[in-house]
Image: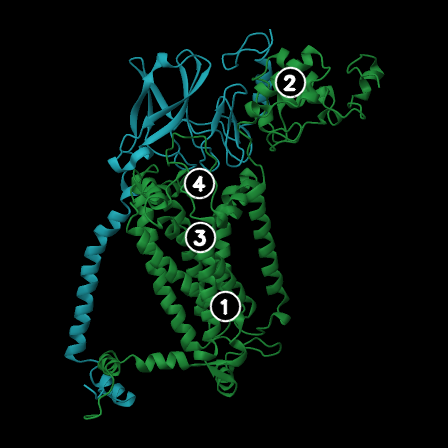
Chain colours: A green, B cyan
Amino acid sequence: MPGQKEPWYKRVYDWLESRVQLEGPVKDAVLHPVPRRTASWWYVFGSASLVLLILQILTGILLALVYSPSAAHAWASLELLNHELPLGWFLRAMHGWGSNFMVAVVLIHMTQVFLFGAYKFPRELTWIAGVFMLLMTLGMAFTGQVLRFDQDAYWGLGIGASIMGRVPFVGGQVVHLMLGGPIINGATLTRFFALHVFVIPGTLLALTGLHVWMVLKLGVNEWPMPGRIVRRETYIREYHELTHSDGIPFVPGAVWKDLVFSAAILFAVACCAAIFGPYGPKGVPDPTIINTVPKPDFFFLWIYTILSFLPPDMETPFILIAPVVGIAALLGLPFVAGVGEKSWWRRPVAVFSVMFIAVCWGVCTNLGTYTPWSPKMDAWSGAAVPVELLRSRTPLERQGANVFQQKQCRNCHQLGGNGGERGPALDEVATRLTEDQLFRQVLLGGGNMPAYGSALSPAETTALVRFLETLHPNYQTPSEDASRRLVGQGGVQTPAP
Amino acid sequence: MDEKASPPSPPAQAQRQEAESVTRRTFLMNVGIALNAAVALVIATPVVAYVLGPVLRRKDYLQWIDIGSVSDYSVGETKLITYQNPFSDPWDGATAKVPAYVRCSAPDEFTVFAINCAHLGCPVRWFSESQLFMCPCHGGVYYADGSRASGPPERGLFTYELKVQGGKLLINAGQMPTLKNRASANPCPSIATPTAPQLVSRIESCPDKKSPGTSASTIG
């Protein structure tokens, strides 16, 4: 109005608004009614995922200012970030922990949506977009692990290539496509850089836009009540009645909880980053340094576990079929169970599925963290035979202890709580196996033990078995083949008690 | 600028659309779409070829690589070597180097093993005393001749095709071996091979004569 001068910021706002005209749609979005009971703490995980995605993009851009996507320099640029640029380590830690939190929060969000039946009519497509967003998030986690170009990244790529190499017919080509060439080198890193920085985040952002748009258009899922059945014919009318009779505007009715939780999550990421610091980089990505123990990041450990336990002939079918079945099940879910009960009180199969998957995941991750699948590579030279096992032994038995160390038996077998754990501890082996069985086991192997027939001379074998026969507690005699004494051939001499 | 131009009402829009459905303008728009589709196809072809580049190259990444003279390797020894990937760029850095194991089982009898475990590609380590390769990932173990001893691998170690030329040992290398991309055409002892006869021969070859693969006895 002429004469009455409005404050300058109001004039600036009006000038902008008359051009962009966004006030209407934004008002519609923030004031759209949500069911009163839905404004619950259970509904904060979706917005927290979005906040973490934004955090990842911002920290990612800042890291990209310094990171050099070259196989020759990537590791050094990460070291520079860690040690020379002020707070570079904190930025890397925020990005690393942000990714952990993002995967976790996305999975919690998905579980909540599943248990609350929010994927049912008319929100099927929102769920499907979400499934693809989950895959993108996991893709970001894996490609991010590759960009941290250290030994784990290098051999992790090797594991990825070995898995892809199992695809029938085109496996070889798929490996070359994945690595950007026939071996892991600079072309592999630039390829994963493009995926991690452009392709996957771009797609993820587009899908996020679609996902949030559909949430706004279709409304936030109402609190599931036992007996309130979803029917295609009546659901939308019922939902509108509910939101208009017992709804509150999204802002501020529900948004304050989202805001509080997002702030808490960001603070938690910052705390973890400050306390635990950045991830690696571990050793230089030099393939000629083979004294390395590659291990995937936390969220992929369960795959590592499954790959360890599958029998060889089941491995390839499982690796190729299980992911397809899993993704198809997630995508097919809203079409199979798109209507009906939403409440978990009336969906026991859903509840037990979640519990089953959670327990499996937890067990596999735990096994992946602690199971000693591999020989302890330096036990043969690093862990001495306990002295008490050598006391008052014959020279031959002591020589056997020598053989035991020198032939790397300790890499898989413990003595006195030291050594590898791939095979059983041998402190009391003489109570389990007779002389003949010991010879057989050493020479022919068996179970999961290699045959040592060609790596041991007869003299060495004899000494080794004599030593193994002394490994029994004092109160327990070594096991012996009863038939020997019966036939009167002597055999194992039972030591006098 | 204060007045927002209101869009035509939905019925008016529908009416207008119907009137224009088969006009010259719609036809021209369709021509425009077709033109764009054609141009997109023309542009997409080289893009697809570019993206599939690593697959379309056929075998030209393999090359015979000199890994030293035959006399560098003594009989009964398995040695860790490093060779340079035949086609590498300056920005490959250390990843241009590839490790491998050379086994000399008898004079002029060589086997060159890839470093990668046949299970998931982790680097196996050689233990000369027990004559075993052990993998640090899931505990795959192989015998000195590369055949599978235990653990999850479904076959023996991958081997490189090799030849001896002018006293030099050459291997045909350049790609990472996986189950579909063998390091060479050499068949490797696989899990399908019956194992029992092999084990018997192991024991038979053992006594008396010290086989070249065996380390010096620790007992006189």
- Earlier in the chain: of badge 4 and badge 1, it is 4
1 or 2: mark nearer the eye? 2
Residue B169 visible, this angle: no
Question: Rounded to the nearest whole Å, what is the CA distance between mark 2 and mark 4?
Answer: 37 Å
Above/below status of A324 relative to A388: below
Residue tagged 1: A335
**Mark 2, chain letter?**
A
> Horizontally, is A337 left or right of B45 in the view?
right
Above/below status of B38 relative to B104: below
Question: 10 Å neighbourhood of mark 1: few (<14), some, or many (≥20)?
Answer: few
Residue tagged 3: A273
Residue tagged 4: A159
**Whole-percent x, y for residue A35 in the image:** 51, 80
Q: Secondary structure at mark 4?
A: helix
Question: Which residue type carries mark 3?
Answer: Ala
4 or 1: mark nearer the eye? 4
**Mark 4, chain letter?**
A
Question: Which residue type carries mark 1?
Answer: Phe
Kindly indicate whether the residues beneath marks 1 and 3 are on one polypeptide chain.
yes
Question: 10 Å neighbourhood of mark 3: few (<14), some, or many (≥20)?
Answer: many
Q: Nearer the viewer, residue B78 or A263?
A: A263
Residue B108 visible, this angle: yes
Question: Rounded to the nearest whole Å, what is the CA distance between mark 4 and mark 1?
Answer: 35 Å
Residue tagged 2: A401
